Image (cartoon, grey):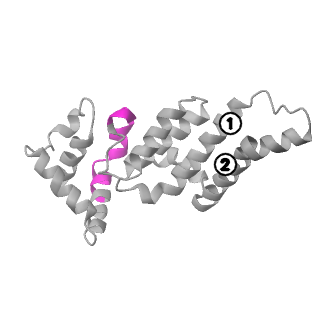
Amino acid sequence: MINLLITHFYNDYHGSFPGSLNRFVLENKNDVYVLVNNWINHKMDGSIFKTFAAEIENELDFKNILKNLDLKDYSEGSTFDVIDRGTILHIVNGLLESINDYGKYRAYITARQNLTWYENYSDIYLAIDSAINLLELKELYCNGFKSKNINEMYEKYCSEYYNFDFNYRKFYFYYDKTKLIDIILFKFRF
């Protein structure tokens, strides 16, 4: 079973594959990939896949393997749940450290949207996306709001400034749904 899942991960990996995992990679990589993808997407057996994937992830201590890898190399992987946790942690750490690489963060989120584990983390990803929107707005309006009079301020609110309010509310909507503090606690679980 380990061989099937690591071979599946291998096919989604971009970069120099970790040597510690090479021994698990099977020769018929494409056939294995198709087989595992069908299993992942099977309506009834997909949940069994997730159970096996979680067991293998723990058995191999996959989170420690990912810690030594570059997110850009594994960000499109769908084999293990820890890939989403690693992606979220990477983005949150970047935002907390004021690394304003918003386009890259959005690309990572977009890459995850149609993958196996996204549904477990969709609210977190949506909260992060709203936070990114707020940070971009903060940079755009770093000199404050400028209007000649109240009417112009109202017009600008209706056309532009409302985005602050919209993204703030959207962030807290998803924050409340996910208990976003868990993202910070990923540091202790990842």
- 10 Å crowding of disc 1: few (<14), some (14-19), many (20+): some
In depth, the one of 81 and 135 nearer the eye is 135
Residue 67 at what x, y percent from top left? 39, 37
Give the alpha-carbon distance from disc 2 to disc 1, as whole Å: 10 Å
Residue 137, numbered label = 1
Rendered residue at 13%/46% (across/down): 30
Q: Secondary structure at mark 2?
A: helix
In depth, the one of 91 and 38 nearer the eye is 38
In depth, the one of 96 and 63 nearer the eye is 96
Left or right of 28? Residue 164 is right
Residue 78 at what x, y percent from top left? 31, 50
Residue 154 lies, with reference to residue 1, above or below; the image says: above
The three-letter amino acid code for the residue at tag 2 is Asn
Residue 56 seen in the figure: yes
Residue 134 at what x, y percent from top left? 66, 41
Q: Main secondary structure of the magenta part?
A: helix
Q: Earlier in the sequence, mark 2 or mark 1?
A: 1
Q: Is residue 64 magenta?
A: yes
Magenta residues, start to end: 55-73
The residue at the far right in this view is 149
Residue 69 seen in the figure: no
Residue picked out by circle 2 = 167
